[in-house]
């Protein structure tokens, strides 16, 4: 029996199959139920292919928790009896206190529900440990009682109001104060119970609920609420696997939204680990995001039968490692039958260059070019409650991981599918409705035949935009598409997609001529259109079509040229970082000035900017890269940063002048509150330039003999001077305000420089040169460098090992008798699990796999994870934008 368990544990780890296996283990609870997913769980289910699994398990329908409707109960995916639905299952990635009002609304909508099962990805211990959660140590049982009590109160209030409306007995309502109170309850109050002081309704007990219970026999005969059974269970497998070996957390989950640092002098952003923190405290100062990550990793390892040897790099990772060690010591049972795993936690703040850079990765290009689904409207507090909820106020609004692939061009009239007549008017509309999963794509007033034909003739421009999802690209020839692309560079990735398209065309017996050489966006477009020649072919090959369309968007203009311009500028900065600080600061200033010169000369002329011209926002992103590189190459100067006061002052003035000279064209987070003043300034500047460009006409000669110039000349001069002074004063005030904002921006850049300086490998340079070529090593990210040292079994400076309680006992107590336990080495583990606290990008995944291949460590299994997917724009928002402390 033990050998069988060990052989199962030693099998290869597949994150997608593990999630699907966990879903099948709850088949009894979900059978014949209406299944509600919150936004975070829906993100995860797209990546794991969870919806087909739920259909296989016999779920009636899958609906959105935040957008629940009374019509949800009428939808059914399977043939069942006409009996009303009695089972409801909720899958949430948030705290129970945050999801409470949505769950309560669903129960109130569907009165026939008798069994309500709630699966949450936040464990019971994490609920009690979270600083903002109102539930105690027995969180699940407390919430079961709370939900039942609030549902009872809500149903009885609703029945009171309904009964009073039917009888229309005003006198009885006046005599009965409890009934009068229920009549006064608004509709939204019945569906959205109010909360008090940041806690959920009914947590402290409700006397009104007890009174209603006493009078329930006089109100309703059915008393349906008494038959409701509520159960809360833990389901930790809620994450987004990009491939069987790489995953991130859903952006709309409680773990990803929780802050990773508090606002102190050493904090970069609420979404990034701090530069330093006090690790001697008892854990009360640990940010809530760190606590939730520790509990998630602990239960994830338990679900996958992994016994973790914990190693950390960075202050926040060390804090998470301490929590993980305590959890493993308290709750691990049967650890001997589990597979030993080396868990390496790394702070994202130690390497801010890699996620800001535009590396050679096709998947990163897709992530940056594709639009993302808008976040769901989530509000833990009541709409009528003016108090701000403490949980929601501290949440990060990260972009979702649902990358949308535009597909409307496939169904335009110019496509062969439409010209060939394979789609009727109704067929095209029905097909698009089925793909999008909506009830109707037609605009209001388009129900008659004339308007419908008009919409079809005009193509999809009059319909809602049609998008696919990169998360549901699936597999091609039994190969996971994203997994195959993650370890390839841009050129190799596009060639692989072209090969997949050609194989699909051969299977569809469609011939098309292709050319040799590099793959272009236009070539991908022609192959996609040929494969989408009929509806059946589109449905059979929808995965590769979506993936190829995403690659086409990434390779098209202006994305492709802009990406190459970024990469070229970053290479220049890396070369300048090896020279002097003056050389690097001059390069940064030149990049800022280049982004302004063309726009200043052509503003208001209607000219399109040339390909590859970087914006002011782009130049600021490059400044983040430059400061991070300077932190590693140069010591801190008297100004607190890596550059001298004169060099930094020139950079500040260059950015201020760039913002004043022309509009950035996009939103810049640290300019919040100055949009109106800047817009007025840019309009005045544009009008002034337009007046100067127009030829001056000779003024007409008028007869001024009757005007007394001596009386009016002084008043005219005073009015003009006063107007000029007001305009100059406004511009001066705006410039001073911009300089104040720049001071805050450069304080963040100083922290970026300090974070890079916190971990240097210069003392290990001789070891690194033995591992790989020094030049190629320097240009790689932190994960690649660390893994190269791990596979070479070298000591890593700053790496801390967290021993379990039993390990500490052997080390301290039994060691004196010769029974000491040797410290495990990370390089000796057959399974390495690397998790980046703060986020990861696709370039790091490719570099990690290249480091493993170059070291010849084929026998080592490598898992990679991160808090979220990071793009250069995401890093800007975290440091200087909407998710920053500025």
Image (spheres, rainbow, N blue to C red):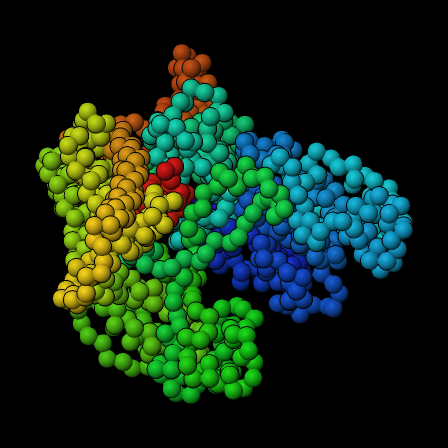
Q: Between residue 855 and residue 5, name the one nearer to us.
A: 855
Up the image or down, 29 lies above or below 548; here it is above
For this orientation, the residue located farthest to the front is 706
What count of labels does the image hold?
0
For this orientation, the residue located farthest to the top is 816
Up the image or down, 843 lies above or below 124; here it is below
| Residue 839 percent coordinates (x, y) | 37, 43
Q: Quadrant of the C terminus?
A: top left
User: Which image quarter: residue 71?
Assistant: bottom right
| Residue 755 percent coordinates (x, y) | 28, 32
| Residue 158 percent coordinates (x, y) | 77, 52
Residue at coordinates 58% horizontally, 44% vertically from top-left?
380
Q: Is residue 487 left or right of residue 328?
A: left
| Residue 625 percent coordinates (x, y) | 23, 42
Residue at coordinates 21% horizontally, 50% vertically from top-left?
710
Question: Residue 264: in sight, yes or no?
Answer: yes
Q: Between residue 787 and residue 6, name the one nearer to us.
A: 787
Residue at coordinates 19% horizontally, 47% vertically from top-left?
592
Q: Quadrant of the N terminus?
A: top right
Q: Between residue 347 and residue 261, name the one nearer to us.
A: 261
Q: Is residue 607 left or right of residue 483?
A: left
Residue at coordinates 19% horizontally, 34% vertically from top-left?
648
Q: Between residue 163 and residue 755, name the one nearer to us.
A: 163
Up the image or down, 617 lies above or below 559; here it is above
Question: Residue 533: in sight, yes or no?
Answer: no
Q: Is residue 434 left or right of residue 729?
A: right
């Amino acid at each position: 029996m033990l050998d069988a368990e060990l052989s199962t544990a030693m099998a290869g780890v597949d994150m997608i199959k593990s999630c699907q296996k966990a879903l099948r283990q709850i088949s009894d609870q979900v059978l014949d139920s209406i299944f509600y997913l919150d936004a975070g769980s829906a993100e995860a289910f797209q990546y794991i292919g969870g919806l087909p699994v739920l259909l296989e398990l016999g779920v009636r329908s899958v609906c959105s928790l935040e957008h629940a409707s009374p019509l949800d109960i009428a939808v059914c995916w399977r043939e069942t009896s006409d009996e009303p639905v009695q089972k409801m299952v909720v899958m949430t990635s948030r705290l129970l206190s945050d999801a409470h009002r949505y769950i309560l609304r669903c129960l109130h909508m569907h009165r026939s529900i008798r069994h309500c099962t709630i699966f949450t990805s936040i464990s019971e211990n994490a609920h009690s440990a979270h600083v903002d959660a109102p539930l105690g140590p027995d969180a699940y049982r407390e919430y079961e009682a709370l939900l039942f009590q609030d549902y009872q109160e809500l149903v009885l209030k609703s029945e009171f109001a309904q009964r009073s409306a039917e009888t229309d007995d005003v006198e009885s309502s006046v005599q009965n104060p409890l009934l009068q109170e229920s009549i006064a309850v608004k509709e939204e109050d019945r569906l959205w119970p109010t909360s008090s002081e940041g806690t959920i309704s009914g947590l402290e007990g409700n006397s009104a609920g007890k009174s209603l219970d006493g009078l329930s026999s006089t109100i309703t005969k059915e008393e349906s609420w008494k038959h409701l059974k509520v159960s809360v269970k833990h389901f930790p497998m809620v994450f987004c696997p990009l491939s069987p070996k790489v995953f991130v957390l859903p952006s709309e989950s409680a773990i990803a939204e929780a802050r990773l640092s508090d606002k102190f002098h050493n904090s970069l952003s609420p979404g990034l680990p701090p530069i330093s923190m006090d690790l001697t405290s008892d854990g009360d100062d640990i940010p809530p995001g760190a606590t939730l990550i520790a509990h998630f990793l602990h239960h994830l390892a338990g679900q996958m039968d992994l016994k973790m040897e914990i190693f950390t790099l960075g202050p926040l990772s060390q804090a998470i490692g301490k929590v993980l060690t305590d959890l493993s010591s308290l709750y691990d049972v049967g650890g001997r039958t589990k597979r030993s795993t080396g868990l390496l936690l790394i702070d994202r703040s130690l390497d801010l260059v890699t996620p800001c850079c535009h590396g050679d990765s096709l998947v990163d290009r897709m992530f940056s070019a594709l639009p993302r689904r808008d976040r769901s409207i989530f509000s833990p507090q009541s709409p009528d409650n003016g108090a701000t909820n403490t949980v929601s106020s501290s949440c990060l609004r990260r972009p979702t991981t649902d990358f949308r692939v535009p597909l409307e061009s496939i169904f335009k009239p110019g496509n062969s599918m439409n010209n060939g007549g394979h789609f009727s008017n109704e067929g095209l509309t029905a097909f698009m409705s089925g793909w999008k999963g909506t009830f109707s794509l037609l605009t209001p007033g388009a129900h008659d035949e004339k308007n419908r034909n008009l919409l079809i003739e005009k193509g999809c421009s009059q319909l809602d935009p049609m998008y696919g999802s990169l998360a549901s690209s699936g597999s091609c020839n039994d190969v996971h598409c994203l997994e195959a692309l993650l370890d390839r560079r841009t050129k190799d990735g596009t060639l692989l997609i072209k090969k997949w398209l050609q194989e699909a065309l051969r299977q569809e017996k469609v011939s098309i001529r292709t050319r040799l050489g590099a793959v272009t966006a236009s070539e991908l477009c022609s192959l996609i259109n040929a494969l989408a020649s009929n509806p059946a072919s589109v449905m059979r090959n929808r995965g590769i079509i979506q993936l190829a369309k995403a690659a086409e968007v990434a390779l098209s203009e202006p994305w492709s040229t802009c990406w190459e311009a970024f990469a070229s500028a970053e290479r220049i900065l890396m070369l300048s970082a090896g020279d002097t600080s003056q050389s690097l600061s001059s390069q940064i200033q030149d990049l800022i000035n280049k982004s302004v010169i063309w726009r200043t000369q052509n503003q208001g002329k209607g000219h399109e900017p040339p390909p590859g011209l970087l914006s002011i926002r782009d130049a600021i992103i490059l400044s983040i890269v430059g400061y991070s590189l300077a932190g590693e190459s140069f010591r801190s100067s008297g100004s607190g940063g890596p550059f001298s006061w004169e060099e930094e002052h020139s950079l500040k003035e260059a950015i201020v002048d760039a913002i004043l000279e022309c509009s950035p064209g996009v939103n810049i987070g640290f300019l919040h509150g100055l949009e109106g003043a800047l817009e007025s300034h840019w309009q005045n500047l544009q009008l002034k330039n337009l007046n100067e460009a127009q030829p001056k006409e000779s003024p007409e000669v008028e007869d001024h003999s009757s005007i007394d110039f001596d009386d009016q000349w002084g008043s005219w001069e005073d009015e003009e001077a006063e107007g000029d002074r007001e305009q100059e004063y406004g511009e001066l005030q705006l410039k001073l305000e911009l300089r104040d904002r720049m001071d805050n921006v450069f304080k963040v850049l100083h922290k970026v420089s300090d974070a890079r300086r916190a971990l240097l490998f210069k003392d290990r340079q001789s070891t690194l040169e033995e591992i790989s070529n020094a030049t190629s090593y320097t240009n790689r990210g932190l994960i690649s460098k660390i893994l190269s040292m791990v596979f070479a079994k070298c000591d890593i400076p700053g790496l801390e090992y967290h021993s379990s309680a039993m390990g500490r006992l052997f080390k301290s107590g039994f060691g004196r008798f010769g029974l000491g336990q040797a410290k495990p080495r990370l390089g000796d583990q057959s399974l390495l699990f690397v998790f980046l606290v703060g986020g990861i990008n696709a370039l790091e995944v490719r570099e990690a796999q290249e480091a493993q291949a170059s070291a010849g460590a084929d026998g080592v299994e490598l898992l990679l994870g991160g808090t979220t997917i990071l793009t250069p724009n995401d890093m800007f928002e975290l440091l200087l934008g909407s998710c920053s402390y500025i």
